[in-house]
Image (spheres, grey):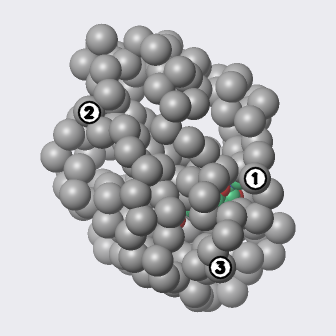
Amino acid sequence: MWNERYAGNEFAYGTEPNSFLVQNASLLTSPVLSLAEGEGRNAVFLASLGLDVLGVDSSDVGLAKAQKLASSRGLAIRTEVADLASYEPPENHYGSVISISAHLPTHARNRLYPLIARSLKPGGVIVLESYAKSQLSRNSGGPKDPDLLMDVTELEQQFPNCEPIVAQEIEREIIEGKFHTGLASVVQFIARKK
Ligand SMILES: C[S@@+](CC[C@H](N)C(=O)[O-])C[C@H]1O[C@@H](n2cnc3c(N)ncnc32)[C@H](O)[C@@H]1O
């Protein structure tokens, strides 16, 4: 499905970074792991700030476009094709992990998130924005399967060793290509590893 979505020359979610990430980029330190990076808009933005970024995604087509986008701007990013349902990031390694519209099923989130917390160095941060469960009633973007949508309580429970900095569900305008467009209910979560 994702390779099909990314097949054309157009960027499905645009080439501009996610605005919640932009607002909070000053919290990030290298190396940065970007979960479900897609076509590279967020990794390329972080590389432009001088951060060392690894973007992981199951779509080889998306990551090939990510590399092209980086090259077109004279920037370098690292990419890895992998399924996050079985991904094992290294322990105590990352300064930051970002997760922007990375919608995984509950069983995959329950497996992955403790590994993400373990992969952060002490003081490292996770920055996550995803569509909330209440987005289901809207047509402005995001998955239509409720199991792929998130809530704040679940995130706080999944990152018990991280101190929340932002943990909220809000409504905001998201304009990110034709698939994310309009007023949306999102979960925003930033937490620092103790
Ligand atoms: C809505 S797109 C968001 C892409 C990117 N984070 C962005 O904000 O532009 C969701 C991404 O999740 C990726 N994805 C979905 N399930 C995945 C999985 N199990 N493992 C790795 N990537 C996955 C898709 O390939 C797709 O690139």
Going 83% across and 67% down the picture, which residue do you hit?
Answer: 1
Which comes before the other along the chain, label 3 or label 1?
3
Q: Is residue 131 visible?
A: yes
Question: Element type at marker 3?
Answer: loop
- Residue 192's disc is none
Task: Give the labeled residue for mark 3.
Answer: 139
Residue type highlighted by circle 2: Ile
Which comes before the other along the chain, label 2 or label 1?
1
Question: Element type at marker 2?
Answer: strand
Residue type highlighted by circle 1: Pro
Task: Give the labeled residue for mark 1.
Answer: 146
Residue 74 drawn above or below residue 59: below
Of residues 45 and 110, the one nearer the viewer is 110
Question: Element type at marker 1?
Answer: helix
Residue 73, position in %: x, y? 32, 74
Task: Determine if the C-beta at disc 3 is less than 8 A from ligand 1.
Answer: no
Q: Tell me if label 2 and label 3 are in contact, CB under 8 Å.
A: no
Task: Give the labeled residue for mark 2.
Answer: 165
Q: What is the count of numbered marks?
A: 3
Residue 28, position in %: x, y? 25, 39
Task: Determine if the C-beta at disc 2 is less than 8 A from ligand 1.
Answer: no
Residue 67 drawn above or below residue 83: below
Characterize the local packing of mark 2: few (<14), some (14-19) or many (20 or more) Cα atoms within 10 angstroms.
few
Of residues 63 and 173, the one nearer the viewer is 173
